[in-house]
Amino acid sequence: MSDIKKAVLAYSGGLDTSVILKWLQDTYECEVVTFTADLGQGEELEPARAKAIKFGIKPENIFIDDLREEFVRDFVFPMFRCNAIYEGEYLLGTSIARPLIAKRLIEISNLTNADAISHGATGKGNDQVRFELGAYALKPGIKVIAPWREWDLLSREKLMAYAEKNGIPVEMKHKQGGSPYSMDANLLHISYEGRHLEDPSAEAEASMWRWTVSPEAAPDAAEYIDLEFVKGDLVAINGQRLAAHELLAELNALGGKHGIGRLDLVENRYVGMKSRGCYETPGGTILLKAHRAIESLTLDREVAHLKDDLMPRYASLVYNGYWWSPERLALQALIDHTQQVVNGWVRLKLYKGNVIVVGRDSKTDSLFDPTIATFEDDAGAYDQKDAGGFIKLNALRMRIAANLANRKK
């Protein structure tokens, strides 16, 4: 008999977590609380409630929470203030959702007096680390049940056999047979892993992509959009102010229409293996381009370079599950300080998979001075003779080294 009396399960209603729900009841003989997060994945969530009830979960133990605004406002936007990209390409769409899910798991465990949480992350992946580091940071004494590290259902086919045996409905079987892609979606992105993507030389099936048209099928006419920023955060598209999650949803629609944001990536996982995944991040791709454009106008040169130096560290912290760590919080404080002057608008051209900056301005915080930058007569605003001095000073160490090398010949 387990000493765990009640566990909160991060429950999507899909194959993995539906099997886990039944497995928890059978293996731990504990009361299960289900938590389903609406992060803008675009799927109907009420079926998760019906499935939970079918397996005996009390209605008061079923939590289906709309976290879209909190997700974008408190997690996505702070990350984009840093322009965070992991290994030069990945916009961290899955990674950034995990600390919010961990936060809510702990909140629900407190509300329901549960002594454990459970998740459907595998023992091979990063999500187990992200969920559990977040949980322990917020509630050090919480117990964690990670079924993939305990059971013997170590393939999609075994999961489906277990589901069939226990009357668990399975949707989205691949039309060619076998198990579906392993997918994760939220307002920032959708990811795909598994099946023939496990062969890194194989091109992804055209039918796999859900949010974006191919660049070849995108409209032949470019579309121009204006994005407005206040303190580093997007606040309006084409003059229309919306809630944070609505802004990102609108960017997703625009990007998807123009074939923007597809990525095929082999990344280095936290556990040490390489993993191939495909991603669609249309809104995030547009947002990153625009944010860097307004920063180019408003940030001091050395501040901008310092941010770029810190960005890979920040991205790795998010990727590896350290959102609640003191070092990420310290970096965020510095980044947010830099963003006080990141105000203005950016004009973009969207065309067949491309996001092209065609204009930007800041009425209050632009550091661009046309009287100095001009190639025409600057009326003495910049004395070009001054350049000779700093060139000689910066060349001094190289001249000394060259003279020494010549003496040794």
Image (cartoon, rainbow, N blue to C red):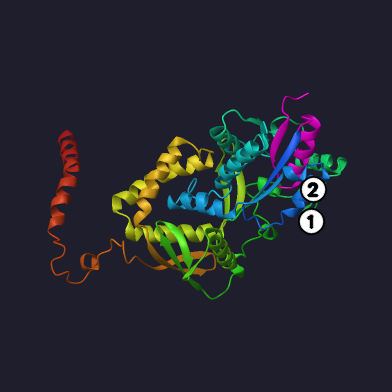
Is label 2 or label 1 in front? 2
Is 135 drawn above or below residue 11 in the view shown? above
Q: Which residue is mark 2?
A: 51
SS type, badge 2: helix
Magenta residues (range): 1-30
Q: CA distance from mark 2 to mark 1?
A: 24 Å
In the rendered image, which quarter contains the C terminus? top left
* Image position of 68 (left or right of 307): right
Q: Residues within 10 Å of mark 2 (few under 14, many from 20)?
A: some
Asked if one can make out residue 178 in the rendered structure from this viewpoint, the answer is: no
Residue 175's tag is 1
Q: Residue 291 lies in what quarter of the image?
A: bottom left
The residue lying at 63 percent from left, 61 percent from top is 211
Along the line of sight, the residue nearer the viewer: 269 or 325: 325
* Image position of 351 (left or right of 228): right
Within the magenta stretch, is there residue 8? yes
The residue type indicated by label 2 comes to: Lys
Q: Position of residue 157 (x, y in %)?
A: 79, 42
SS type, badge 1: loop
Q: Position of residue 210 (x, y in %)?
A: 66, 60
Within the magenta stretch, is there residue 330? no
Q: Residues within 10 Å of mark 1 (few under 14, many from 20)?
A: few
The residue lying at 13 percent from left, 61 percent from top is 383
The residue lying at 52 percent from left, 64 percent from top is 242
The residue type indicated by label 1 comes to: Lys
In the rendered image, which quarter contains the N terminus? top right
- For this orientation, the residue located farthest to the bottom is 221
Earlier sequence position, callout 2 versus callout 1? 2
